[in-house]
Image (cartoon, helix red, strand yellow):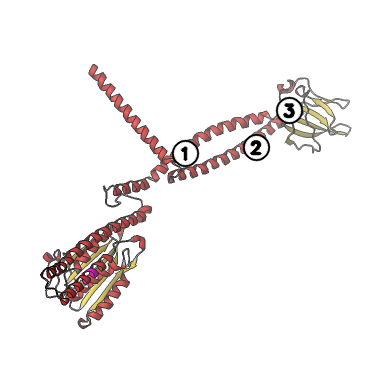
């Protein structure tokens, strides 16, 4: 029994601890949400202002409508009282108006009951008044028309219904009278006040519920933005390499640009490191030759000039390679078709003796997010190799891809030639620095390595295979 009690107490303490933690987290979330500088607070505040303005206007309109309805109800009630008095009015043989001692409405017999009745001649001469109106002044009506009731509010905040009628005698003579029925305004004001109080309670309750719902909806709607902020913090902490969450379509352009910026910055850093490493490695040999010549005192002007020329060429090459930037969506897109045509025009001049025929296949937009130098480097090396290896025909395909299907890539550059192609077991080798597919063909074995590095830094993909249409080599470059 003690064990069960202990377990129950432990379960209760744990549940209480979890509940406190949850409440604390929700309170922190609410405080964060309500910071004056946050977008969440601005949205909630502006939406709440609009809702409050709507409720105030709705309250005024409903209150006005209810007042008119209450006044109309009172008018109809006073109209019934007028008809009740008319039904008991009598005219004596001497022509005097006579009313019964006891009326159907008991309030008219009680002093200051709030309901008053008087009958006047058209000249405002008082003919009869109810017991309830003995100490009360009911404002007379100026002009009137018989049979047409007039309903108004007097200076004492009473609602008065004036009804004129004509009493005709047997001799053909007639007399004009006015029945005035008045009721204190508190009948309407009390109804309006009760209605206003009820309406305010309901509006406040509904408004509070709507604000809470709005808070939940806004928090749910802005969740993708908080996810982006969280992912960026994870990237800064080194836990992630890019924004890879499931973001809404409206934020895809923002996340793609941020990923492009992150990739570009890392690409630049990687490029600088590689360039410095390549530069230091390339300068080792000429520096070693100069150092050896100085130690042996066997240095000549020709040797020194030659090694200096080599070092200048190495530095110039490395600087040119370092100038090739990675993908930068923030700087705009380039027209791939325009760049490829320029490269082909240059190759036609260099290899004019081969009479190569260039065939184009273009589909969709040709805009790609990268620097022109990168595209010149990639397309230039691939086309130069195709011209070297090809016989007479080269096919270039520029295809815009459906990113909803590929999920990663939006553009394809495909180059095919009718040469002898490259064996599959050598495809991975020629992407390494200093490796050439054929030693008999002029080159340094660096071009394809540069192409591969650039495509990797851009976040793309390079594929090589045999062309089924032309029989030679087919290179496919996928751009993000």
Q: Earlier in the sequence, mark 3 or mark 2?
A: 2
> For residue 462: magenta?
no
Bin the neighbour count of mark 3 within 10 Å (Cα to Cα): few under 14, some 14-19, many 20 and up. Answer: some
Q: Magenta span: helix, strand or loop, mainly?
A: helix
Q: Is residue 473 visible?
A: yes
| Residue that mark 3 sits on | 84
| Image position of 87 with respect to 396: above or below | above
**In the rendered view, does 295 fall on the left or right side of 148?**
left
| Image position of 343 with respect to 281: above or below | below
Q: Is residue 461 visible?
A: no
| Residue that mark 1 sits on | 211
Assign a secondary structure to mark 1. helix
Name which quarter of the figure residue 343 lies in: bottom left
Name which quarter of the figure residue 449 lies in: bottom left
Residues in magenta?
A: 313-317
Q: Earlier in the sequence, mark 2 or mark 1?
A: 2
- Give the percent coordinates (x, y) of residue 106: 71, 21
Mark carried by residue 171: none
Classify the position of the C terminus by image quarter: bottom left
Assign a secondary structure to mark 3. helix
- Give the percent coordinates (x, y) of residue 169: 86, 31
Classify the position of the N terminus by image quarter: top left
| Residue that mark 2 sits on | 68
Residue furthest to the top in view is 1
Q: Nearer the viewer, mark 2 or mark 1?
A: 1
Mark 2 near mark 1, Cβ–Cβ under 8 Å? no
Q: Nearer the viewer, mark 3 or mark 1?
A: 1
| Image position of 346 with respect to 73: above or below | below
Residue at x 33%, y 27% (from the top left corner)? 16
């Amino acid at each position: 029994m003690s064990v069960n009690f202990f377990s129950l107490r432990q379960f209760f303490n744990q549940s209480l601890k979890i509940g406190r933690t949850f409440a604390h987290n929700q309170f922190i979330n609410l405080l964060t949400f309500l910071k004056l500088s946050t977008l969440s607070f601005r949205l909630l505040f502006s939406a709440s202002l609009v809702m409050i303005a709507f409720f105030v206007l709705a309250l005024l309109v409903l209150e006005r409508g209810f007042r008119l309805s209450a006044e109309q109800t009172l008018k109809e009630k006073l109209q019934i009282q007028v008809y009740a008095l008319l039904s008991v009015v009598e005219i004596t043989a001497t022509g005097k108006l006579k009313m019964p001692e006891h009326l159907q409405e008991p309030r008219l017999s009680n002093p200051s009951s709030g309901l008053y009745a008087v009958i006047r001649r058209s000249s405002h001469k008082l003919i009869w008044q109810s017991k309830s109106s003995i100490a009360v002044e009911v404002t007379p009506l100026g002009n009137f028309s018989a049979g047409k009731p007039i309903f108004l509010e007097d200076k004492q905040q009473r609602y008065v219904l004036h009804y004129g009628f004509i009493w005709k005698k047997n001799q053909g003579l007639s007399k004009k009278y006015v029945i005035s029925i008045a009721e204190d305004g508190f009948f309407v004001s009390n109804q309006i006040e009760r209605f206003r109080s009820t309406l305010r309670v309901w509006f406040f309750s509904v408004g509070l519920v709507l604000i809470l719902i709005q808070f939940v909806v806004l928090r749910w709607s802005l969740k993708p933005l908080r996810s982006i902020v969280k992912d960026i913090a994870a990237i800064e902490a080194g836990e992630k390499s890019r924004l890879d969450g499931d973001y809404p379509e409206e934020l895809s352009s923002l996340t793609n640009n941020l990923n492009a910026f992150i990739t570009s910055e890392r690409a630049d850093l990687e490029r600088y490191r590689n360039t410095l490493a390549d530069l230091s490695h390339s300068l080792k040999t000429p520096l070693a030759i100069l150092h050896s010549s100085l130690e042996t005192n066997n240095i000549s002007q020709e040797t020194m000039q030659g090694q200096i020329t080599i070092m200048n060429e190495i530095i110039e090459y490395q600087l040119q390679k370092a100038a090739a930037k990675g993908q930068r969506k923030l700087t705009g897109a380039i027209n791939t078709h325009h760049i490829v045509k320029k490269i082909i025009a240059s190759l036609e001049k260099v290899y004019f003796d081969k009479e190569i025929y260039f065939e184009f296949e273009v589909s969709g937009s040709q805009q790609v997010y990268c620097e022109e130098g990168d595209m010149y480097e990639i397309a230039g090396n691939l086309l130069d190799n195709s011209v070297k290896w090809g016989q007479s025909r080269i096919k270039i395909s520029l295809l815009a891809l459906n990113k909803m299907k590929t999920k990663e890539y939006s553009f394809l550059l495909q180059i095919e030639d009718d040469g002898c192609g490259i064996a599959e077991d050598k495809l991975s080798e020629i992407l390494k620095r200093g490796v050439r597919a054929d030693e008999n063909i002029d080159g340094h074995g660096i071009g394809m390595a540069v192409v591969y590095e650039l495509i990797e830094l851009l976040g793309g993909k390079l594929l090589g295979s045999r062309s089924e249409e032309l029989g030679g080599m087919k290179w496919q470059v996928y751009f993000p």
